[in-house]
């Protein structure tokens, strides 16, 4: 296993991060434990979760994933100091979480305390803001005109960002969290957090966790440039495009227990003709080079020096083992050229 610095934190994290949002819905606690133990054995020291998990989110499963990880932490106390646990505070829009309210400084400490209790730990290594308070172009809002950027009160947004930074800095000094990060953030948001932390001598954001894959690469180049220039780690989530790049959803298939067999609050917006055509092309390349399409997709993410750790997830151990193997076999030069040719043909397969 290879390791990278988590932005400006100084922490070393594995190039693979185990995402756990299936724990508590698609996976039982026993299955979650098996995944975490296997990941540890493979050299993974980085685990990602969120207060809103399991996914698809609802009131009944809210906090369940953190609780399962907490039971694992309690059962494995000697391993806690060797693991980097990241979780996230939900943004606005979910009525059963703070009545759907925006993230506010007054809610941060209680949200952290609740996560600490569920995780059964004295500190959180990386505490992330799951999505911005302001309208943003993530998930299924990528196309022109979907978000009205011109109609926002950016002075108010800046004031709220400063308040969040001040409260997070207070929580770092109290020992509740070690570092803070962002998720589903834009180049403007990244720059604003960096600017205000410097201006007011507050703890810096150390990472940005955004969607990035062969079927969704909107962060290149502007978000990536912002991360590099501000020394923030870039953590791709959904590197398999919610599983579509595995090929399991071709021809309208919906395997039992898979993500697309469940209701999704954002809808299955990746279910587009161009996505499936791209997937078929990647599958052909993968077969040629003795890989699966999942592996070639993950190896493509891992090849970039500005990717700190790729967040993977699985519902079956066979999937986890297949995905982990992708990080042991870098793309050859010829394979990378063929993948690039398909990527150029389908640069924006969904939006």
Image (cartoon, helix red, strand yellow):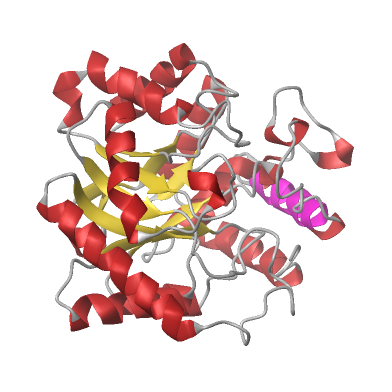
Vertical relation: 326 (above or below) 183? above
Q: Is residue 306 visible?
A: yes
Give the residue drawn at x 51%, y 32%: 62
Tell me where residue 324 sits by quadrant. top left
Q: In which quarter of the image is the N terminus?
A: top left
Answer with left or right where residue 313 lies relative to residue 287.
left
Quarter the C terminus occupies: bottom right
Please name the residue shown 63% across and 39% down the image: 292
Up-down relation of residue 263 to residue 36 (above or below)? below
Asked if the magenta segment contains residue 280, the reply would be yes
Question: Left of 161 or right of it: where is 345?
Answer: right
Residue 350 among magenta residues: no
Quick check: 351 left or right of 55?
right
- Which of these two is toward me, 325 or 51? 51
- The image position of residue 87, as x and y in percent, is 36, 43
Locate residue 273, reporting x and y percent.
86, 56
Magenta segment main secondary structure: helix
Segment tinted magenta in the rendering: 275-286
Q: Where is residue 329 in the image (x, y as percent from the top left)?
A: 45, 44
Relative to 123, residue 12 above or below: below
Q: Which of 190 and 196 is in front in this view?
A: 196
């Amino acid at each position: 296993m290879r390791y990278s610095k988590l932005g400006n934190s100084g922490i070393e994290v594995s190039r693979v991060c185990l995402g756990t949002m299936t724990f508590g819905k698609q996976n039982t606690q026993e299955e979650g434990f098996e995944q975490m133990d296997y990941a540890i054995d493979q050299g993974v020291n980085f685990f990602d979760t969120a207060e809103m998990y399991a996914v698809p989110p609802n009131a009944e499963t809210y906090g369940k994933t953190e609780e399962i990880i907490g039971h694992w932490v309690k059962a494995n106390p000697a391993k806690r100091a060797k693991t980097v646990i990241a979780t996230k505070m939900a943004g606005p829009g979910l009525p059963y979480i703070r009545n759907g309210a925006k993230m506010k400084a007054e809610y941060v400490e209680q949200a952290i305390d609740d996560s600490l209790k569920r995780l059964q730990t004295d500190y959180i290594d990386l505490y992330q803001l799951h999505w911005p308070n302001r309208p943003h172009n993530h998930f299924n809002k990528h196309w022109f005109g979907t978000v009205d950027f011109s109609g926002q009160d950016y002075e108010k947004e800046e004031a709220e960002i400063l308040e969040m930074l001040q409260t997070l800095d207070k929580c770092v000094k109290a020992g509740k969290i070690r570092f803070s990060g962002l998720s589903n953030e834009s180049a403007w948001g990244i720059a604003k957090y960096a600017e205000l932390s410097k201006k007011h001598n507050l703890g810096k954001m150390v990472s940005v966790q955004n969607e990035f894959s062969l079927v969704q690469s909107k962060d290149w180049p502007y978000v990536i440039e912002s991360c590099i220039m501000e020394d923030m780690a870039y953590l791709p989530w959904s590197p398999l495009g919610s599983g579509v790049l595995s090929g399991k959803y071709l021809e309208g298939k919906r395997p039992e227990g898979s993500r697309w067999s469940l209701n999704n609050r954002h809808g299955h917006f990746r279910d587009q003709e161009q996505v499936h055509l791209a997937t078929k092309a990647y599958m052909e390349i993968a077969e040629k080079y003795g890989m699966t399409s999942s592996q070639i997709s993950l190896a493509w993410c891992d090849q970039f020096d500005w990717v700190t750790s790729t967040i993977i997830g699985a519902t079956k151990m066979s999937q986890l083992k297949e995905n982990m193997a992708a990080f042991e076999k870098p793309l050859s030069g010829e394979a990378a050229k063929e993948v690039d040719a398909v990527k150029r043909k389908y640069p924006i397969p969904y939006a």
